[in-house]
Image (tube, grey):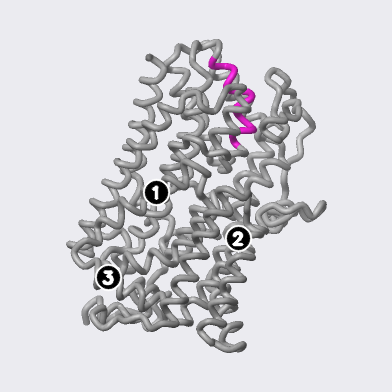
Amino acid sequence: MTEDEKLPENPENDLASRFPTAYTILFGLIILVAALTWIIPAGQYERVMNEEVGREVAVPGTYQTVDPNPQGFVEVMLAPTAGFYDPDSYVANAIDVALFVLFLGGFLGVMNATGAIDTGIRSAMRHLKGHEIWMIPILMTLFAIGGTTYGMAEETLAFYAILIPVMIAAGYDAVTGVAIILVGAGIGVLGSTINPFATVIAANAANIPFTDGIVLRFVLLVGGLIICAAYVMRYAHRVKQDPSRSVVAKQWDAHRKLFLKGHEEGFEDATLNTTQVIALVIFALTFAVMIWGVSSQGWWMARMGALFFGAAIVIGLVARLGEKKLTGSFVDGARDLLGVALVVGLARGIVVIMDQGMIADTILHSAETSLGGLPELAFINLMFWIEVGMSFFVPSSSGLAVLSMPILAPLGDFANVGRDLVVTAYQSANGLVNLINPTFAVVVGGLAIGRVSYDRWIAFIWPLLLILTVFISLIISIGTLI
């Protein structure tokens, strides 16, 4: 019997990996960070309100040790819940992101019930036959624009379930679809130019105009995008020529069954009916409205969730699904992304444990003392690596900016390094780490939707990380010398 003949009837069974699941990894990190609160001394900086940033920022030179608050068994057990909302004050943490994911799942469930996505994919493949590879740089550029302008991150979760089937139908694999979105938007954030959640907040916290250093960041953006697009295209081409070279080759057939639902053949006969065309128009308009709302109207998860909920109802009415099929499809779709919603809470729980254990400021103080008296090149490169380390614990670009920039940016004055270069080192480090960061909900959420295990993602992306690290170090070093 061949390997192909031994495929399990349930394709989910073939998606298993000996590597731990995202849930186990994240809960293990919660335990690790809780253990660190017993080892790392607790400490805090004094904080004052910065009106430009809109948050309290640390005051340089005010660090002092405080009474420890080590996190024990009870805090570890509460961390997944605290990741969603504070169980004492009921202040929201990641509950809005998790609910958005569920509403998104329901929307996709209703859309799938119309058959429009499946038929549309097959129709698109018929028209793009022979030119599919050019979808990769075009789509990655669009996601990079979103990342560099408004920090596109959590909202990318809406695109995985749409793009991955297209890539698989084109002869690529699930990793290609994940990479287009995650790396595309990620390189945009890494090379942020006017991103208000990274560059603008960090520049304000460093007391400089956000336009300082924009040319260097634009070089990072364009150069990084070219590198990443070429890397993904090369990988996709190899996979299409020889599927055994895919990092998820063992899940090749299972992925096709899951994402194409057995309709990978018959592209020539794919024809959209009028109802499906209308449904696809509403579908596209929904995403266009989401991007408009986030980029210009200040929308966040609650309003995006309401948009997808309303769009699901409209699509169900247009397609005449009926009340039972409409609600059933919505619930089934939400159920499909329930695991992603749980991952979001677990990821935020790590940050909660660190904050409650009061070790973040201690780590920052250690960084402050290690940078003193270094020459220019050593200073900026060590700054980059310090921000890399801190990004694993503080994946939020705005959170890391508010935490680190008021303390670390002024140190550049003593090393004769511009504060704009410190901001660039911070954002490039944070953007690089968030391509793989297991504490970042966007990474674990996107991989969960794509059914790509974390170890397979690392196997795909580690060479790209090395290339980007060298590229970033070269750019910030040149920026320091000129």
Q: Which mark is residue 304?
A: 2
> Which residue type does callout 3 highlight?
Met
Q: Could you say which is closer to the camera, residue 85 or residue 266?
A: 266
Element under disc 1? helix
> Which residue type does callout 1 highlight?
Gly
Q: Residue at x 71, y 36 (%)?
A: 358
Residue 254 position in % (x across, y down): 35, 74
Q: In the rendered structure, does residue 401 fall within the stretch colored magenta?
A: yes
Q: Could you say which is closer to the camera, residue 359 or residue 217?
A: 217
For residue 306, which quarter of the picture? bottom right
Q: Residue at x 78, y 29 (%)?
A: 66
Question: Looking at the image, is 399 positioned above or below residue 364?
Answer: below
* Horizontal side, residue 153 vs residue 79: left or right: left
2 or 1: mark nearer the eye: 2
1 or 3: mark nearer the eye: 3
| Other-residue count near label 3 (Cα within 10 Å), few / some / many at <14 / 14–19 / ≥20 | many
| Other-residue count near label 2 (Cα within 10 Å), few / some / many at <14 / 14–19 / ≥20 | many
Residue 453 position in % (x across, y down): 42, 60
Q: Which residues are magenta?
A: 400-412
Which residue position holds label 1? 184
Q: Residue at x 24, y 73 (%)?
A: 126
Whichever of callouts 1 and 3 sits on the residue coming sooner in the sequence is 3
Please identify the residue farthest to the right as the structure is shown. 89
| Res 43 seen here | no
Q: Residue at x 79, y 55 (%)?
A: 90
Q: Which mark is residue 13?
A: none
Element under disc 3? helix
| Res 161 seen here | yes
Q: Quadrant of the C terminus?
A: top left
Residue 103 position in % (x across, y down): 60, 68
Element under disc 2? helix
